[in-house]
Amino acid sequence: MSIFACQNLTKRYGKLTALDNIDLELESGRIVGLLGPNGSGKTTLIKLANRLLQPTSGSILIDGKAPGVESKKNIAYLPDKEYLPDWMNTRQLMHFYGDFYEDFDPQRATVMLASLDIPSDMVLKKMSKGTKEKVQLILTMSRRAKVYLLDEPIAGVDPAARDYILRTIIQNYEENSLVLISTHLIADVESVLDEAVFLKQGHIVLHKPADEIRTETGKSVDEYFREVFRC
Amino acid sequence: MLGKLLKYELKAMGRIILPLYLVLILASALFAVNIKLNDKTQSLSGFMNIISIVTTILFVACIFVVVIVMFFLVVQRFYKNLLGQEGYLMFTLPASTLSHILSKLLSSLIWIVIGLFAGCSAGFLMVAIISDMKTFNEFISEIMWNLDSLVGSGSIVKQLGMAVVILILGIMKSLSEIYASMAVGHQFNNHRGLWSILAYIGFSLIELGISYLPFVKKITVQLTEQGGFLYNEQFHGTFAIAVLFSLIGILIYGAITWRLLDRRLNLE
């Protein structure tokens, strides 16, 4: 059974169809790039998996369960927003994550936060945008989850921060888990991807191992993406 | 999960409202000391006059600030923490939508009740400072006597208990109405604050309209005249109506909020 499975999944916002009858199965132990331009339906798919949205029709299952309280125990989600309460400091946030997630590893978070020299009593409000994003990532990747859903983790950060983020993901994800990274910055993530899913206007136009794409097309995933999505 | 959510919610509200409650009690003590000094010295010096004005302003301002901040906190904690960007954190926790709503409702209720205690404490503190203790004891006895004669039967604890139940249910209904209004406003993509206010006005008008419906009026009159289904006195009949209407309000507003947050969440 796939850890992440969508069947005839459709999501409409009024007259706009964000996802149109998609079928997708993803397995554990893979790093998958959910690739597509803005408005292609990447965030909608991730929100559906987190039950932040309800599908118009079709189904989505995480480890065999429909999105809900049980599935949320297994999903480590990084939204593309500043979503943490800004009055909390990192120590309080670690307690918060530890209280709500049984799979949270405070040791791992402490080591990563210490490497960034962030004082444990500094509230989020006083941190720079880049530091806040790193704290969010650290808390997400400090969970020993079955599924990591990372929505645009490298958008809007400088190249050095991108390296840090990708390194943190690679060094900390659970090897038997699924990591789904949504992005339109293919070149930066290409080296870490096992598979790529191309999403175009709510349709999956390609789902293949990254190596297969390179072998079949003679191009990098990034080059092939640019070809498929040429305006 | 409700316990954990409630713990964080109480902490989030308490860090702002608790210091204000302490300032309110302090301000009431200063105000009372000032009145006591004014009583003793008939003619005030210029300095004492200024102190007198400052303590009075501080005391009155404190009351207004506490009420306004409490209202702001009730709205802000629900709007920012559930419907704003923090909603991405909260709604992906392994907790049900009902737990989220209850944690907000109970936390606000607890802090409002603590606020009422703080207000009463400030009042008693003022009386204790202004009068000497003998007069204070007389004051308490007088309150008890007045309450006793007001409600008549002598079972003052029971009457006060019913008043407290009505008060708590009334607060819960008001909070539920505010939450439901925000949940409705959240369904729109723009001007969500404005739509929330309009939803609140709409709910209030519907409530008003329902209270004028002939069959509701008939029930109200019957319950009052016949003594209600709980007791056989006029006060008890009114109590039964108030409890019933508050419970219905809490259930309806709660159901609206739950339905919209659980099935039609619309985070930006």
Image (cartoon, coloured by chain):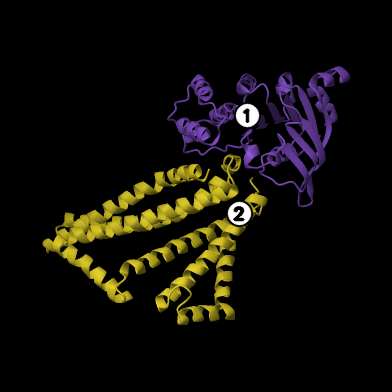
Chain colours: A purple, B yellow
Assign a secondary structure to mark 2. Answer: helix
Nearest to the observer: residue A63 or residue A52: A63
Residue B31 relative to residue A229: left or right:
left
Q: Specify whether disc 1 shares its chain with disc 2.
A: no
Quarter the N terminus of chain A occupies: top right
Nearest to the observer: residue B55 or residue B72: B72
- Which of the numbered marks, if any, corresponds to residue B258? 2
Residue type beneath disc 1 = Ala
- Which residue is depicted at the point 76% across and 52% down? A14
Task: Kindly tell me whether residue B185 is visible in this rendering.
Answer: no
When the figure is inspected, residue B205 is found, relative to residue B92, above or below; the finding is below
Write down the chain letter for disc 2.
B
Report crowding for label 1: few under 14, some 14 to 19, many 20 or more residues within 10 A (C-alpha). many
Image coordinates for residue A125, horizontal then vertical, percent: 48, 36
Image quadrant assignment for residue B41: bottom left
Assign a secondary structure to mark 1. Answer: loop
- Which residue is depicted at the point 48% across and 68% down? B243
Task: Kindly tell me whether residue A196 is visible in this rendering.
Answer: yes
